[in-house]
């Protein structure tokens, strides 16, 4: 049985017909969880270009890719001789070593390991890859290397409509950029903060942990996923950009109000039917829409 999200997406994708597939670049594409763009990929509306330098994780990506998936066993970052620190827990693998002092400061010594494998490599930049076309949506989750991706991808991202990135508030890797650094770079490249998909917090260590409920005392912000969208008048976007942004808003980062905003501009241009908003809203969850009896007089 189709979910609310599937039904909602189907309304958009059944009507909006961009001239080409949406190009999604996923840096740190290991399948630790289902990617938020999976619905668009399943529907054949997107082509994913994924990067994963960990050979074990890369092997999983290429086991049975669809014709709309292209993967590179490469680390993305600024040029030079670097080291990939492969952690026994795949989600902690990074171009940056764990900062022992910072990790201990938040009581997460269990993240430290004497089984981290250093692997020398030379990162690539997005702008130097001939096999990567200009990007519509960039997704990043690479444990500290996000700023390097942005600085090495200015040209490829020049017409992108959105960036979804992990951001760090409390440093856990030595020398990794924090949220403010990424925010400044994204704004310099023409994006604005749209929303946080989620944030995670941890409890500060103390000697009274046996007397408290840990999940109720997590005051220290750690990290999260932030969404940035192109910072310009929506009217200045092309029809394709508006459609891709509507798809991303609906499916990737759950902003149906932004999708409706894009639809309004498409209707004004004659690029979408006038009844699309009502059909779309009809697929919202009940608490997201008002019935006629609930509307203000």
Image (tube, helix red, strand yellow):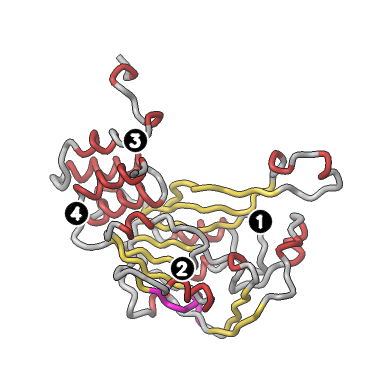
> N-terminal of the two: label 3 or label 2?
2
Majority secondary structure in the magenta region:
loop
How far from the left and from the top, in percent, is residue 42? Answer: 32, 58
Badge 4: how crowded within 10 Å, few (<14), some, or many (20+)? Answer: some
How far from the left and from the top, in percent, is residue 272? Answer: 17, 45
How far from the left and from the top, in percent, is residue 211? Answer: 83, 39
Q: Which mark is residue 256?
A: none
**Residue assigned mark 2:** 27
> As drawn, is 278 to the left or to the right of 151?
left
**Residue assigned mark 3:** 284
> As drawn, is 214 to the left or to the right of 48?
right
> N-terminal of the two: label 1 or label 4?
4
Q: Residue furthest front?
A: 1
**Residue assigned mark 4:** 17
Q: Which mark is residue 170?
A: 1
Tell me where the magenta segment starts and ends, as one range: 71-79
């Amino acid at each position: 049985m189709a979910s609310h999200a599937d039904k909602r997406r189907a309304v958009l994708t059944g009507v909006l017909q961009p001239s080409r597939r949406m190009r999604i670049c996923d840096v740190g594409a290991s399948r630790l969880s289902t990617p938020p763009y999976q619905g668009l990929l399943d529907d054949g509306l997107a082509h994913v270009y994924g990067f994963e330098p960990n050979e074990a994780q890369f092997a999983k990506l290429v086991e049975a890719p669809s014709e709309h998936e292209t993967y590179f066993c490469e680390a993305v970052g600024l040029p030079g001789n670097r080291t990939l620190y492969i952690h026994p827990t795949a989600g902690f693998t990074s171009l940056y070593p764990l900062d022992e002092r910072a990790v201990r400061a938040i009581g997460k010594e269990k993240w430290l390991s004497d089984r981290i494998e250093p692997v020398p490599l030379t990162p690539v930049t997005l702008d130097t890859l001939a096999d990567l076309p200009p990007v519509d949506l960039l997704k990043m989750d690479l444990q500290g290397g996000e700023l390097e991706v942005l600085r090495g991808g200015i040209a490829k991202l020049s017409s992108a409509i959105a960036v979804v990135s992990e951001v760090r508030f409390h440093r856990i890797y030595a020398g990794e950029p924090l949220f403010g650094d990424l925010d400044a770079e994204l704004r310099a490249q023409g994006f604005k903060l749209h929303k946080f998909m989620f944030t995670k917090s941890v409890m500060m260590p103390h000697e009274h942990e046996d007397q408290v409920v840990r999940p109720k005392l997590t005051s220290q912000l750690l990290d999260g996923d932030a969404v940035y969208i192109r910072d310009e008048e929506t009217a200045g976007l092309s029809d394709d950009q508006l459609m891709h942004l509507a798809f991303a808003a609906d499916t990737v980062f759950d902003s149906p109000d932004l999708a409706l905003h894009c639809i309004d501009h498409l209707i004004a241009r004659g690029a979408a039917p006038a009844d699309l908003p009502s059909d779309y809203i009809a697929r919202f969850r009940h608490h997201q829409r008002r019935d006629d009896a609930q509307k203000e007089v």
